[in-house]
Amino acid sequence: MGLEIAFWILAVVSVAAALAVVLLRNVFRAALALVLCLLAVAGIYVTLSADFLAIVQILIYVGGISVLIILAIMLTRDIHHGSLSNKLRMPALVVSILFLGAVGYATTNTLWQISGAPPVEPTTAGLAGKLFGEGGFILPVEIAAVLLLAAILGAIVLVREK
Amino acid sequence: MSIGLEHYIILSAILFSIGLYGVLAKRNVIIILISIELMLNAVNVAMVAFSRYIVPLLLTGQVFAIFIIVVAAAEAAVGLAIIIAVYRNRDTIDATQIDLMKW
């Protein structure tokens, strides 16, 4: 019962915050709404018993990426223009609603093979085994390290003063 | 009514649609980037929900979600660097005015 209440509260908060991101005129408030949405999604992970992922979400998204975005908003000083819509507002709305309808139709008409097994708790040891263990995802982990290095170097080169 | 896989998939689809609308309809490049983050988060919710309800003992969906977070962090860093470089050169972050390569 507690899980249902938690899910509905977090779902409403995350959807409302996501709507605020695209509907608010003030860019800075939209970024703060994004932080709220990311926090609610971390709570959704907790209801799915993904404890490690919830902490990772708070550390990287709420702690890292949102600070980066707010810093970029400060640096570009374009706040007074606000977050305006372009000419494609109505087509974009139609495309989004069509996409939502298609996914909703597909979801409700699929026979999911739900497994009755209880979730693994805590997930940290299982995730470590998957990422670094025998027959796991060790090659993607190495590639992710190279990707992060390339991203850091690229960001430094892009913003460096000539 | 108990919460099942469908609830999480629908929630993920709603968040993804909102992000899609933001990407298509907004002029501020930073808002477009924020909307992309929303879409990546929606995909993560679907990944973790599938992992929890279809293969609860394998955890593969959560591993995929970790990789998505890594790629999202790299994308945000490079994307914001590009935005700051564009702002330095052209003094605007309006996507309708950054049209040098548009024919």
Image: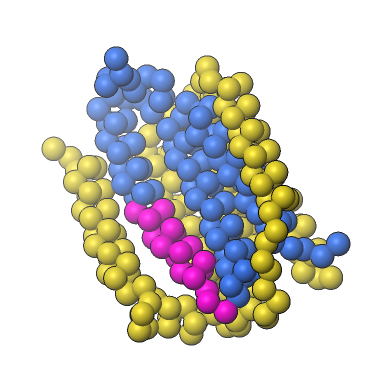
Chain colours: A yellow, B blue
Name the magenta segment's main secondary structure: helix
Q: Quadrant of residue B29?
A: top left
**Quadrant in which residue A120 is drawn:** bottom right
Does B69 appear in magenta?
A: yes
Residue A45 in view (yes/no): no
Query: How far across and how far down the image is residue A115, in percent?
Result: 67, 73
Which quadrant is home to the N terminus of chain A?
Answer: bottom right
Q: Quadrant of residue B88?
A: top left
- Foreground of the two, A81 or A144: A144
Looking at the picture, does residue B101 appear above or below residue B68?
above
Residue at left offset 34%, top offset 54%:
B74
Instruction: Tell me the residue at 24%/62% (across/down).
Output: A146
Q: Position of residue B30 (x, y in %)?
A: 44, 37
Q: In the rendered structure, which segment of residues is drawn in magenta?
A: B57-74
Question: On the picture, is A30 further left or further right than B36?
Answer: right
Indicate the position of residue B40 as horizontal and vertical percent values: 50, 50
Q: Nearer the viewer, residue B31 or A132?
A: A132
Q: Residue at x 52, y 17 (%)?
A: A87
The residue positioned 25% from the left and 27% from the top of the image is: B89
Q: Residue furthest top?
A: B103
- In the drawing, does residue A159 fall left or right of residue B32? left
Tell me: residue A116, above or below residue A160. Answer: below
The answer to whether one can see residue A53 in this image is yes
On whether residue A25 falls in the magenta region, the answer is no
Relative image position of residue A80 (x, y in whole percent): 50, 26
Q: How many marks?
A: 0
